[in-house]
Amino acid sequence: MKANTIKRHFRESFKSLGRNRWMTVASVSAVTVTLILVGVFMLLMSNFNYIADNMEDDVEIKVLIDLTADEEAEKALLTAISHIPSIATYEYSSKDDELQKLIADFGEDWALYEQSNPLHNVIYVRALNPQETAQVAAEIEKLASIEEVAYGQGKVERLFDALNLARNMGLVLIAGLLFTAIFLIANTIRITIMARGDEIEIMKLVGASNSFVRIPFLLEGVWLGILGSIIPIGLLVVIYNQLYDVIAPRLSGQLIQLVPPTPLVYEVSALLIGLAIVIGVFGSFMSVRKFLRI
Amino acid sequence: MIEMKDVYKKYPNGVIASNGISVKINKGEFVYVVGPSGAGKSTFIKLMYREERATSGSIIVNNTDVTALRDQKVPLLRRQLGVVFQDFKLLPRLTVYENIAFALEVIEQQPTIVKEKVMHVIAKVGLAKKAQHFPHELSGGEQQRVAIARAIVNKPAVVIADEPTGNLDPDTAWGIMDIFHEINQDGTTIVMATHNKDIVNSLRRRVIAIDGGEIVRDEYGGDYGYES
């Protein structure tokens, strides 16, 4: 293809946006509305996942070491744990450390036990994948010199089940929303191109090849996508930043935290603009294809 | 130039629009295609530029075997032909100049050459002053001149016209015929389906009469032959 032809395609695609002003407005509005929905939902899901991940990361296994274990046995246990491939971190905490923690958390009353510490030496273990905590715990349980392995059995499983269900529902919702968006936008573009069926017919009559007819329409789809993503991206970036500035300080120190706006909003923006372009091109492609059969 | 052999065309609805047509049209000829409505004139024309595909038989246009032509190659055939219609088929949002230039842009001509060629044909059809007008600002006759200019700007060997004067009043129609006559004088083959009895009877040329999908008469310098 010659440079002049490429220039012509670009020029024509821009001109056509102006010439079919109402069609352009209709398509761009469809893109805008659906992308706002998709964008809001993506931000919600990101935050939900962030919170869920934080909760999961807080799950740890508490390995109580048998009181009869001597230093040698504890060392062997630590080495054995460190060799389990699916663990992320492990941390030894002596029974004196444990008691200090209790005193710090629950008060000086507990200092009474300093005379005769009833607690166990402990190893805290986190699984590489929090969802595999139960398996890791089971593996540790097999080792020698262990009194008990505790990780909130039962509760943790229920938490994970709930989080997974919510994640999957979110995915289904996003997929549904995307499907609706593609359908709505592709349809709007299709109607706008239908109205130009005679234009395509004439192009074919004077000997235009299929790609020559198609390219300006595809470019137009790209512009429609880009134009349609400006407002959603602007809104999401501004509003999420504002919202974060207002809400984040109030959540400091809490279990629930918001995802920091940078880079999240830019990632979502890139995703939205990419999505819009894909949808625009797809809509154009499907619509023009109908007319190109001779 | 154009040669049809035993061309048979049956539409999906069962209508047989071409029932074994064989005809040969030589380079530089001017041919009227006449016949009652529904006789198969339009199909005859459409088969030539591959708007319709023949069910059987062979059609050669300008050394191209149209019946064997793959869909992707159809644009190449169209570039060797100029086609003019009763309803002009101009792009309403393009100016006169752009409508004509369009036919050259499609085949990726250099912009400087495009300009030169377009200005040349615009002058030829007498619309030099209206180059920047839009089709809706022109009369029917003027719009048809634009369509003709678009058809000939690429110097095709054949111009095919389907009732080009069908929407025009008699005076205007004659103006259009003058242009076709002139194009023909330059050596371009012209095939024109028409209902215009006066024109066929006055500007005597070869007449191919089609009825029921068959050629019922093929006569040089013939008359219209129907009371329409």
Image (cartoon, rainbow, N blue to C red):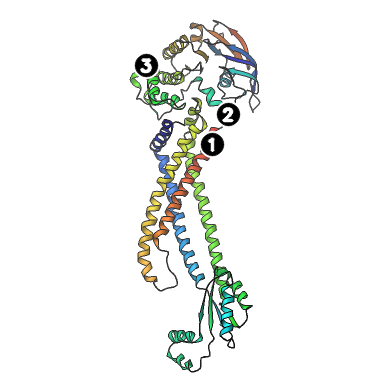
Q: Amino acid at mark 1?
A: Arg
Q: Is residue A158 left or right of residue A24?
A: right
Q: Position of residue A174 (x, y in %)?
A: 51, 56
Disc 3: which residue: B123
Q: Check disc 1 and report its element: helix, strand or loop.
A: helix
Question: Nearer the N terminus, badge 3 or badge 2?
Answer: 2
Q: Is residue A90 left or right of residue B153?
A: right
Q: Residue at x 60, y 76 (%)?
A: A140
Disc 1: which residue: A289
Q: Check disc 2 and report its element: helix, strand or loop.
A: helix
Can residue A219 be spotted in the picture? Answer: yes
Is disc 2 surrounded by few (<14), some (14 to 19) or many (20+) residues within 10 Å? Answer: some
Disc 2: which residue: B71
Q: Amino acid at mark 2?
A: Asp
* Relative depth, front residue between B118 and A143: A143
Rendered position, A32 above or below B190:
below
